[in-house]
Image (tube, helix red, strand yellow):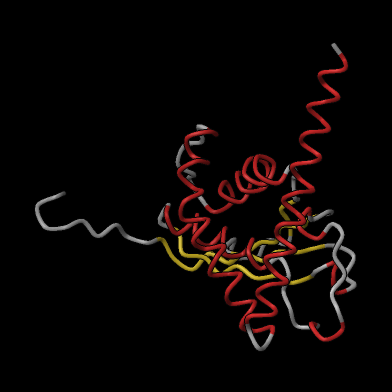
Amino acid sequence: MSRQSNRSTDTKKMNSELFTLTYGALVTQLCKDYENDEEVNKQLEKMGYNIGVRLIEDFLARSSVGRCQDFRETADVIAKVAFKMYLGITPSVTNWSPAGDEFSLILESNPLVDFVELPDNHSTLIYSNLLCGVLRGALEMVQMAVDVRFAQDTLRGDNVTEIRMKFIKRIEENLPAGDE
């Protein structure tokens, strides 16, 4: 019986490592294809956005989470449900702005950066920028415009990885005439 649970754990670890290595290969190829880190950062964010736009449907179906009432609830769902479901980690939600429209997700560990060291010639590369795009794309699909950026990164020598999220506005659904 315990043998099966070990296999399940081994399979999850192998899947995680395969994902990490595949992501690394993607970033490496982007660095070869584009002339500077800024372009790579834009491409990673754009790819993440496209993933987020599609991933939100899977998330809503699998998590059975209802509509969040405010930005604080949204932050908790992102940290405690979404990150846990897709990356196996639970970042802490902290550093709220006084207006309650901005917060930080603190990742003690970032599974995307396992086995990664940034070369000196890529000091401005935001290696995990895909995550910012995923968050922005997913939230846009539930009518929330947000700004998402990395504030700290362990790959740059910081103690933690910090993703900063700022609420911009609620997006109004534009229904075609007659579809109200």
Query: 115 or 80: which is nearer to us?
Result: 115
Which residue is at a point 50% across and 55% down the rendered structure image? 138
Q: Determine whether 94 is above or below 83 in the image.
A: below
Query: 171 or 23: which is nearer to us?
Result: 23
Q: Quadrant of residue 85?
A: top right
Task: Provide residue 157's location: percent of width, then percent of height.
Answer: 90, 72
Task: Provide residue 63's location: percent of width, then percent of height.
Answer: 55, 34
Task: Provide residue 71's location: percent of width, then percent of height.
Answer: 54, 54
Which residue is at a point 87% across and 17% down the rendered structure image? 3
Where's the N terminus, which quadrant?
Answer: top right
Q: Quadrant of residue 101?
A: bottom right
Q: How many numbered tags mark residues here? A: 0
Which residue is at a point 44% across and 59% down the rendered structure image? 140
Q: Determine whether 143 is above or below 146 in the image.
A: above
Q: Determine whether 121 is above or below 6 in the image.
A: below
Query: 173 or 11: which is nearer to us?
Result: 11
Q: Quadrant of residue 15?
A: top right
Task: Provide residue 180's location: percent of width, then percent of height.
Answer: 16, 49
Q: Residue furthest left?
A: 178
**Residue 145 vs residue 147: left or right?**
left
**Residue 38 vs residue 116: left or right?**
left
**Residue 174 vs residue 141: left or right?**
left
Which residue is at a point 52% across and 63% down the rendered structure image? 49
